[in-house]
Image (tube, rainbow, N blue to C red):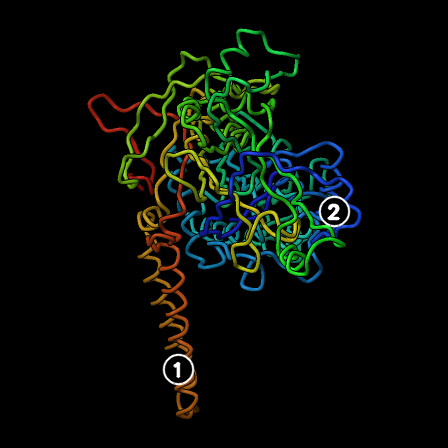
């Protein structure tokens, strides 16, 4: 889980889930209280004042402000000396837990490069939300052991808007090499190769889309921090108000039909009520000190988003008839999945309804998958970008994040602070926010956008890491630690006392325990283990199955590669 790009942020290890209450009435907003009330952060005060003028805001708007506002956002106004990542920060990501994680991501890219014909040029790597650069550093170090692939890579693009994180990434990936500003961002030279450019862009749209190139795209703990809209189904009510659209009142037939059917209402964010300092009791004032600044409330009538977004997929429509059903939809997540797909397979941002694309749909055991045709409506994803014509689809995207395998996420918005779960509505700008990822929605967006891609997974992270040879890598690292300890012992032979010898043994024991403990944490498949909660999903060029043969599966998703 990692950093973010402009208007899109990334992420963290957040295994616990906070479930907010879902009130059925919209709480009143006390406009006059924003000035006298003590808010937890300056950003909270700014948000409250804006809401007092415009009314409640969507969860997406709230998340975007909390994470990327220039006036106190979590990622964009980092406090001096404080790091979001690591034991001293708010969360620890998989690459920080063990080097094996980033190494296996590098191996996966090598395997796909081999499977797709070993292109000798025109390859680039792109990572969205690269955090401190740890994953990319481990991956590039691994790729260096495969010279033909390393030589084929023209550039590495890091989509990052945070200046402080860019500096951390540059120091880790480029060392003392100079960092130059370009028309689209910044650029430096990799410490792993003087011929390899590292380029930073604030927005994925600044990364060139070239039909002749082969992209390898990494998104680790990126989608979990992209803004969501939240909707709740309500039962039909004869006296419900007539819904209006952006163009005015709906036709009487539409309004009548809405009164007879369940409807979606958007859950919006508004300030909590503060007690009157002169009339409240001491107990009420003390209780108010611990309440969040904001709360979820239900919109009194349909919003433009509630009329449009839940109608984009049959998965959402099927839940509308169940009163109180809650769904979360992330248009920005679907935009990124579509962007990845068009870079790999070409195409446009929409697909004709009659087109048959292909997605790998998880089976009930979540560890295997099958390829089935999926017909997707063209109305759910439109863009003004010109279509990309790619005569030979190539490349791959690997998404590693957490969320349900096939169900629509609900009530998953959570706050993370100092490795603990907290309310997402307290201390805006100081608390990280995350949500569960809707992997099926990402797959739908990808296959809708390009006729030449297929989607594999999601599979549980533990299964993916095991299939990638992670356990064998653990053995290599342990043997390497033992060999280094033996070498040190031989070099000091004859000049070491008993105490020093015991110290060396303790150091070796700690190294081995660290390697093995890190691996076990990554693959733990307990109810809240990272190996179960986190998932892996891949977007690849669509390949027809050979006549009478089995369709190719990528490494880590039930397949293999011939070297």
The local crowd at label 2, few if under 14, some if 14 to 19, many if 20 or more residues have their Cα within 10 Å, is some
Circle 1 sits in a helix, a strand or a loop, which is it?
helix
x, y (%) of residue 112?
Answer: 39, 38
Residue 321: image quadrant is top left
Does the CB distance between marks 1 and 2 fall below 8 Å?
Answer: no
Q: Nearer the viewer, residue 489 or 102?
A: 102
Against 151, residue 544 (above or below) is above
Circle 2 sits in a helix, a strand or a loop, which is it?
helix
Against 419, residue 398 (above or below) is above
x, y (%) of residue 54?
Answer: 73, 31
Q: Foreground mark, 1 or 2? A: 2
Residue 110 in the figure: left or right of residue 383: left
Residue 234 in the figure: left or right of residue 359: right
Real-space CA distance between mark 1 and mark 2, rounded to the nearest whole angstrom: 61 Å
Determine which of the numbered discs, if any, sits on residue 489 in the image: 1
Residue picked out by circle 2: 45
Q: For the point 38% across and 81% down, which residue is it?
A: 505
x, y (%) of residue 381?
Answer: 53, 21
Against 103, residue 229 (above or below) is above
x, y (%) of residue 384?
Answer: 62, 19
Q: For the point 43% across and 52% down, which residue is it?
A: 145
């Amino acid at each position: 889980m990692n950093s973010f790009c402009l208007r899109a942020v990334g992420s963290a290890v957040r295994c616990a889930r906070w479930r907010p209450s879902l009130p059925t009435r919209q709480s009143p907003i006390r406009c006059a209280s924003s000035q006298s009330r003590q808010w937890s952060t300056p950003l909270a005060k700014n948000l409250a004042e804006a809401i007092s003028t415009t009314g409640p805001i969507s969860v997406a708007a709230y998340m975007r402000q909390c994470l990327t506002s220039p006036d106190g956002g979590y990622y964009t106004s980092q406090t001096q000396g404080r790091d979001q990542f690591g034991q001293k920060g708010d969360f620890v990501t998989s690459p920080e837990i063990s080097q094996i994680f980033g190494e296996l991501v590098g191996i996966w890219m090598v395997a796909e490069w081999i499977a797709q014909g070993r292109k000798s040029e025109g390859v680039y790597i792109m990572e969205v939300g690269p955090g401190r650069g740890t994953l990319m550093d481990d991956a590039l170090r691994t790729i260096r052991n495969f010279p033909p692939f390393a030589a084929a890579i023209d550039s590495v693009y890091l989509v990052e808007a945070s200046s402080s994180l860019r500096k951390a990434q540059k120091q880790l990936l480029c060392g003392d090499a100079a960092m130059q500003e370009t028309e689209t961002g910044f650029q430096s030279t990799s410490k792993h190769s003087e011929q390899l450019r590292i380029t930073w862009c604030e927005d994925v749209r600044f990364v060139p889309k070239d039909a002749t190139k082969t992209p390898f795209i990494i998104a680790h703990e990126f989608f979990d921090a992209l803004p969501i809209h939240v909707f709740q189904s309500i039962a039909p009510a004869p006296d419900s108000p007539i819904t209006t659209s952006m163009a005015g009142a709906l036709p009487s037939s539409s309004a009548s039909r809405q009164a007879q059917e369940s409807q979606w209402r958007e859950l919006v964010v508004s300030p909590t009520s503060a007690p009157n300092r002169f009339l409240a009791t001491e107990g009420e004032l003390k209780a108010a000190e611990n309440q969040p600044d904001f709360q979820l409330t239900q919109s009194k009538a349909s919003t433009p988003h509630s009329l449009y977004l839940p109608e984009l997929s049959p998965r959402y429509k099927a839940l509308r008839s169940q009163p109180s059903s809650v769904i979360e939809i992330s248009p920005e997540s679907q935009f990124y999945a579509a962007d990845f797909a068009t870079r790999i397979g070409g195409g446009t941002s929409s697909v004709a309804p009659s087109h048959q694309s292909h997605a790998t749909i998880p089976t009930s055991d979540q560890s295997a998958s099958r390829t089935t045709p999926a017909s997707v409506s063209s109305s759910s994803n439109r863009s003004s970008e010109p279509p990309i014509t790619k005569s030979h689809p190539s490349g791959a995207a690997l998404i590693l994040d957490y969320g349900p395998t096939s169900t629509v996420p609900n009530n998953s918005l959570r706050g993370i602070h100092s490795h603990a779960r907290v309310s997402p509505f307290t201390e805006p700008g100081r608390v990280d926010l995350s949500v569960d990822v809707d992997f099926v929605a990402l797959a739908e967006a990808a296959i809708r956008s390009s006729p030449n891609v297929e989607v594999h997974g999601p599979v549980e992270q533990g299964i993916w890491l095991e299939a990638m040879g992670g356990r064998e890598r653990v053995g290599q690292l342990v043997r390497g630690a033992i060999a280094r300890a033996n070498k040190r012992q031989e070099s000091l032979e004859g000049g070491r006392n008993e105490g020093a010898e015991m110290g060396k043994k303790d150091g070796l024991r700690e190294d081995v325990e660290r390697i093995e403990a890190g691996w076990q944490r990554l693959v733990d498949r307990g109810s809240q283990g990272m190996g179960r909660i986190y998932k892996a999903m891949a977007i690849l060029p669509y390949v027809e199955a050979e006549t009478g043969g089995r369709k190719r599966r990528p490494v880590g998703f039930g397949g293999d590669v011939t070297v």
